[in-house]
Amino acid sequence: VGRDNPLVERLRAFTPLSPAQAAMVRALADPQAVKPMRRDLIREGDRPRAILLLAGWACRHRTLEDGRRQILQVLLPGDLCDLHNAVLGRMDHSVGALTEVRYAELAPERLEELEADPDLRRALRWQAAVAAATQREWTVNIGLRNAMERLAHLFCELFVRLRAMGLNDGQACDFPLTQVDLAEATGLTPVHVNRTLQEMRRTGLIVLDRRRLTIPDLCALAETGLFNAAYLHLGPAGQEPRAPRVMW
Amino acid sequence: VGRDNPLVERLRAFTPLSPAQAAMVRALADPQAVKPMRRDLIREGDRPRAILLLAGWACRHRTLEDGRRQILQVLLPGDLCDLHNAVLGRMDHSVGALTEVRYAELAPERLEELEADPDLRRALRWQAAVAAATQREWTVNIGLRNAMERLAHLFCELFVRLRAMGLNDGQACDFPLTQVDLAEATGLTPVHVNRTLQEMRRTGLIVLDRRRLTIPDLCALAETGLFNAAYLHLGPAGQEPRAPRVMW
DNA sequence: CGTGCCGTTGACGATATTCAAGTGCAGTGG
DNA sequence: CCACTGCACTTGAATATCGTCAACGGCACG
């Protein structure tokens, strides 16, 4: 589907953009690159670079010396990454492609131009604030919830974020995370994720098969995951799905 | 001890400040307020306000509907809070005083002035980037580590942050967190925290009594907590303790 | 001298991990 | 076309870690 630049869509959920402003945002995506599935875009120790994800799924992740790995954040099309981390000398974690991804590295000059516009500066701050709120919510998710709640919460977050970008397909969406990925994102073991998923399937909370997720009853899933979308701070545009539909 | 404004000290760890710049930063602290122990400075649902903590300990925390509570971040003197969250309509979590605190609410105009100075803008970004990195590290801590590792890591982080501000006392520091607080910060139960602390005391990793923490061997504690201070991005000034001392 | 909070203890149980082995499917090469 | 390989997923049994419940002790404060 010939969509607009996903960052334009994203920022429009927060504030209206003039044609000139939209053009400035689109210009960010100009020198594009592609990275194959399961390769890192940025590695721990690299100098930080600002990145705009245009298509595909990516994640921030960190690996301990003994090999244990934690997925810190899932990045979807339209997500910005390390916009302001350039002030830090080196990355303290990595950013990896979960699927094949298309992305753009953002030239500092272009970013300066955007920051010069008060509306865009506010919109970029909103984006950064939402990313920080999401990181906090992940801390809550892992610290406070049990296995099924954690998985339900993660499914809700990703589905709602995809839906806000029009990347869902009714009650279904692509879902490229493996059970190992889910384990690394939720702080569980792959075995326990497997058993918990089976229980969620048995009770009809989710259908998850061949990298495809269907949520028959989002309301029910949100209840079991104690999911409240407030932390995503979806603007007025994001609070209702793009295609009119009964809300939960 | 008559110290400089703690934010001035903090930012100087990142970049030198001219007298004029330091004066602008000091001006932020002007209308000061005090909040008694265990009261919230900002509540979930409030409009976000930018806050500078001048003395005492505070924390961000979030409570689920069923009463479970998570401490998301510990705020120490010199920490800034919600500088850029004003773009969000409402707080999705609370900020509470762990001890009696002295703080300042920052007028947006004053912040604008600071942001107009490129050096200060960079310094404030560094501060925000470190806060984000710390939040990620907490996700790792809770997601990947067991009880003793989590506590050891938390002790290391807080001690190193205090030391970078000169708020330690050799190998000791104030430590106002109760065992319930530690439990809420690490995603454990108070009972399990208690047992784990006893084990840490038995093995001589820590001395913790009457709100006072002593770390006989920081290196050993860092090893058991898999603590690596890189994520705190302490500048050149912060990498060595203020009083010359053998580093671990 | 009570009252309340914080810390401590014991017994028991639930949740999640570990280890090890096996299944199914997709892609590869003979 | 079919064996072969690799990867994701699945299963079972034994175990570890951590949680729950309930009660008690000490200390500070009023």
Image (cartoon, coloured by chain):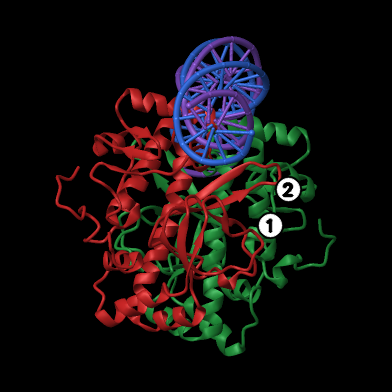
Chain colours: A red, B green, C blue, D purple
Q: Which residue is mark 2?
A: B222
Q: What's the distance in space between the residues labelled 2 and 1, CA to CA?
A: 9 Å
Which residue is nearer to you in this view: A182 or B67? A182
Question: Crowdedness of circle 2 by 10 Å Cα count: few (<14), some, many (20+)?
Answer: many
Quadrant showing the N terminus of chain A: bottom left
Instruction: Kindly identify the amino acid type of the residue bearing the numbered disc 2.
Output: Ala
Q: Residue A245, percent across and down?
A: 15, 47
Q: Which residue is mark 1?
A: B229
Query: Circle 1 sits in a helix, a strand or a loop, which is it?
Result: helix
Instruction: Kindly identify the amino acid type of the residue bearing the numbered disc 1.
Output: Ala
Vertical placement of residue C3 versus A34, above or below? above
Q: Residue B149, percent across and down?
A: 66, 40
Query: Circle 2 sits in a helix, a strand or a loop, which is it?
Result: helix
Q: Would you say B44 lies left or right of A132 here?
A: left
Which residue is nearer to you in this view: B40 or A175? A175
Q: Are marks 2 and 1 in contact (CB under 8 Å)?
A: yes
Q: Indicate the chain on which mark 1 is placed.
A: B
Number of marks in the rendered image: 2
